[in-house]
């Protein structure tokens, strides 16, 4: 692991840390390591867990009477009410609405992976075309306590970050690009939002430049009536082509760049302090009823999650215009060890009327429950079961089982609106659009070609 910035001798002197291996993510008050949750879980349960977490969040929103929250509709509505939903034999699903929000347990998995790949491509492109390029990770935070509201802290931190990045002290660096990532954690001191900002330039940042940036951040904080200790609230870790990559072989950079991208973009961070949690981690523990692993009460955890979910108008990722240009230039770079989903060869077609009936009867994302006599009173969600099954026949059999068990609640003949098919000529019967398709309102019906895969 890379060492974080060394202890500073005074508030007036900032040291630059030259890193040679994977860096610890700076969380200011707690050391961080990447969790091994996905390695410890079985592959199937790992695939299902985002749906479990989403279901918990949706139930929590209902419990607290929060209506029309975008996440409430995620995976519970169709994109087009005139088009069928397809369950593919690569465990994917089409024609389902996604909220596409970074706080959503299901959507964030794809959002973070896409951003990770995008960053890696940009790093590759910059390093290949600028042998002397250096990468510097700047971490910004502000004082916080349990009485501060997350929304207030976040607005203030975002404004301070924006003022710093627009200041002459940054512009004079003549950066190749910069990119910022927001991370939010919770600890005994309350919500702790902070930014990780990747700066890239020719040659390393000098000690004088680092000190100038720190001093300016401190001045900006004073304008917001905030006293910032730059030792605790400002950190810089430096990388360059001689330390982050093996110059002899360009392809060997992939693993190093993957580690660097993970430092900026990861929703799977575990904190060494048992009082500090990333928000995805806290939601996951609560969703699986592991409150014995959380030091806070159940009611407090719910309050924390609700406050986090209601954070509005926040950009979790933002790049400058130069970064946006580099994204286009690096788009065709092939990343090593990148995985592609297998092409589907079979699918189950659920017509709109049947999909609506399954949704209204809580059979899409529900969690199995039994009564005191061990009788099933609520069945496992269809979409979660589909994620578990590598054989589509198992999913189809489960659908028939759900229909039989819930025949009093479902309309007669629903099984005729659900059918099993083989894909002809390698083409789905309906066009499949990317996950990133923009949708303004979950209540709007789209044409049959406007589908998205979950």
Image: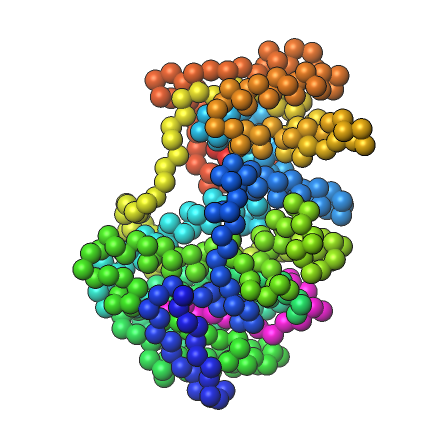
For the view shown, which residue lies furthest in the left direction?
248
Q: Quadrant of residue 221?
A: bottom right
Which quadrant is home to the N terminus? bottom left
Q: Position of residue 354 (x, y in %)?
A: 62, 20
In the picture, measured across the screen, residue 345 lies left or right of residue 367, that is left
Identified at 35% across, 21% down, the residue is 426
Q: Is residue 230 above or below residue 452?
A: below
In the displayed structure image, the side of residue 230 where residue 258 appears, left or right: left
Front residue of this view, candidates 256 and 313? 256
Identity of the residue drawn at 56% across and 79% down: 228
Q: Is residue 190 magenta?
A: no
Residue 405 left/right relative to 141: right
- Please determine whether, in this image, residue 5 is positioned above or below residue 243: below
Left or right: residue 24 versus residue 247 is right
User: In x, y percent, where is residue 40?
Assistant: 51, 47
Q: Examine the rendered structure and indicate whether residue 257 appears above or below residue 169.
A: above
What colour scheme was applied to this rendering of the protein?
Answer: rainbow
Q: Residue at x 44, y 29 (%)?
A: 90
Identify which residue, 388 or 425, lies in the foreground: 388
Q: Is residue 338 visible?
A: yes
From the top left corner, tell me how far across and down residue 119 is, in percent: 37, 55
Front residue (pair 394, 83): 394
Across and down, in percent, residue 141 comes to: 54, 71
**For the magenta stretch, what is the residue range?**
136-152
Residue 154 visible here: no
Q: Residue at x 56, y 42 (%)?
A: 50
């Amino acid at each position: 692991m890379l060492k974080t910035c060394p202890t500073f001798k005074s508030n007036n002197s900032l040291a630059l840390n030259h890193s040679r291996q994977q860096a610890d993510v700076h969380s200011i008050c707690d050391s961080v390591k990447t969790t091994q949750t996905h390695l410890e879980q079985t592959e199937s349960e790992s695939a299902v867990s985002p749906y479990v977490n989403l279901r918990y969040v949706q139930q929590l929103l209902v419990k607290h009477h929060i209506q029309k929250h975008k996440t409430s509709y995620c995976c519970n509505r169709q994109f087009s009410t005139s088009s069928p939903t397809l369950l593919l034999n690569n465990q994917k699903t089409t024609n389902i609405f996604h909220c596409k929000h970074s706080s959503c347990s299901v959507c964030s998995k794809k959002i973070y992976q896409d951003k990770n790949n995008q960053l890696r491509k940009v790093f590759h492109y910059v390093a290949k075309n600028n042998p002397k390029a250096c990468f510097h990770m700047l971490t910004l935070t502000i004082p916080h306590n349990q009485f501060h509201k997350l929304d207030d802290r976040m607005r203030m931190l975002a404004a301070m970050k924006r003022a710093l990045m627009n200041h002459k002290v940054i512009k004079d660096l003549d950066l190749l690009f910069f990119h910022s990532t927001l991370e939010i954690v919770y600890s005994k001191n309350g919500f702790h939002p902070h930014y990780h900002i990747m700066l890239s330039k020719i040659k390393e940042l000098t000690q004088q430049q680092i000190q100038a940036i720190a001093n300016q951040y401190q001045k900006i904080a004073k304008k917001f009536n905030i006293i910032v200790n730059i030792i605790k609230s400002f950190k810089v870790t430096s990388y360059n082509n001689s330390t982050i990559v093996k110059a002899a072989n360009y392809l060997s950079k992939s693993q190093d760049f993957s580690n660097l991208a993970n430092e900026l973009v990861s929703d799977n961070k575990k904190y060494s302090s048992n009082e500090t949690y990333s928000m995805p981690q806290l939601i996951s523990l609560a969703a699986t009823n592991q409150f014995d692993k959380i030091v806070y009460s159940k009611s407090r955890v719910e309050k924390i999650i609700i406050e986090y979910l209601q954070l509005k108008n926040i950009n979790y990722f933002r790049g400058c215009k130069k970064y946006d240009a580099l994204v286009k230039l690096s788009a065709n770079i092939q990343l090593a060890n990148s995985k592609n989903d297998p092409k589907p060869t079979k699918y189950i077609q659920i017509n709109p009327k049947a999909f609506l009936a399954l949704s209204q009867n809580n059979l899409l994302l529900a969690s199995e429950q039994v009564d005191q006599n061990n009788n099933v009173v609520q069945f496992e969600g269809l979409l979660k079961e589909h994620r578990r099954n590598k054989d589509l026949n198992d999913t189809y059999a489960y659908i028939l089982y759900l229909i039989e068990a819930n025949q009093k609640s479902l309309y007669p003949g629903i099984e005729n609106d659900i059918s099993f098919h083989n894909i002809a000529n390698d083409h789905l019967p309906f066009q499949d659009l990317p996950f990133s398709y923009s949708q303004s309102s979950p209540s709007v019906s789209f044409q049959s070609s406007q589908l998205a895969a979950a």
